[in-house]
Amino acid sequence: MYERVYLVLEQKRSLYICAKPKLMESILFLPGALAGKTQVEALRSKLGEQYQAYALSFPGHEKESMDERAFNIAGLADYVLHWMDENNIVAAHIFGYSMGGYIALWLARFFPKRVKCIMTVGTKFHWDKEQALKEVKMLDPDKIEAKVPAFAETLRRKHGENSWRLVLQNTAHLMTALGQYHLLEEDFRLVDTPVLLCRGENDTMVSEAETLSVASFLKYSNTCFFSSRGHAFEDYTTLEISDKLIHFLKSHKSFSIK
């Protein structure tokens, strides 16, 4: 069912022609859950001298208006494609942190012509109902406001007084959906896009095993482990990620098929 739907959409989107060809290649930065484009702005700015660099916020995040698309991976992937169309981007390199990396791989699986290569950092690949339930429990806005008010205030400032709770609720819905419908081994094996999977060695959300497992499924892939780094994007420096990303963008065409 999903396969047929996405193939039809891909055929329609493949007819799209960029109105204004760009001299530099495009790279798109996708943030993680509960964050917006400001999370990856420093990276976007760093790569802006060499690439047409873009970053986006997902619906409802950082005061972005809500969208009629379903708030699940398929809906968010379609949102990215629509955004690319509006910005005359036929295909782009994609950097995705956490959830952003998962969306990038979903795009590579179902819309391969729109993705040139992917670098992910801190992306969780193993999803089932148990894992989804575990994550959802940490997204209760009332509990967050009561137990970690500073975090609640951060979300309030970032997304707006009337939206931060909805962002949490939508993310919980996303996690629940991922517990049932997610990329499987056969999906990863069908991805033809070069991918660099990065993980912090102290990341307690994303295991080394799942990262290496997905890397083994992908046709063109490599892995990178950052020492003394956890899951939070703030654990990383802009310099260390940008250096790794720039090197990957220059060398990804040399990836050999497995």
Image (cartoon, rainbow, N blue to C red):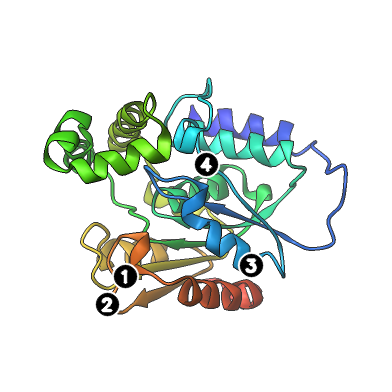
Residue behind mark 2: 228
Counting from the top left corner in percent of width and height, residue 130 is at 17, 40
Name which quarter of the figure residue 200 lies in.
Answer: bottom left
| CA separation in Å, label 2 and label 1 | 7 Å
Q: Residue at the location (65% across, 76% down)?
A: 250
Within-10-Å neighbours for mark 2: few <14, some 14–19, many 20+: few
For marks 4 and 2 on the same chain, the one whose residue lies earlier in the sequence: 4
Q: In the rendered structure, which amino acid carries the disc numbered 3?
A: Leu
Viewer-side label of 2, 1: 2
Total residue callouts: 4
Do residues under tags 4 and 3 come within 8 Å of each other at their CB atoms?
Answer: no
Within-10-Å neighbours for mark 1: few <14, some 14–19, many 20+: many
Query: Which disc number belongs to residue 57?
Result: 4
- Vertical side of 112 occupied by 243: above or below: below
Within-10-Å neighbours for mark 4: few <14, some 14–19, many 20+: many
For marks 3 and 2 on the same chain, the one whose residue lies earlier in the sequence: 3
Counting from the top left corner in percent of width and height, residue 52 is at 72, 59
- Vertical side of 210 occupied by 250: above or below: below
Q: Tag 2, which secondary structure? A: loop
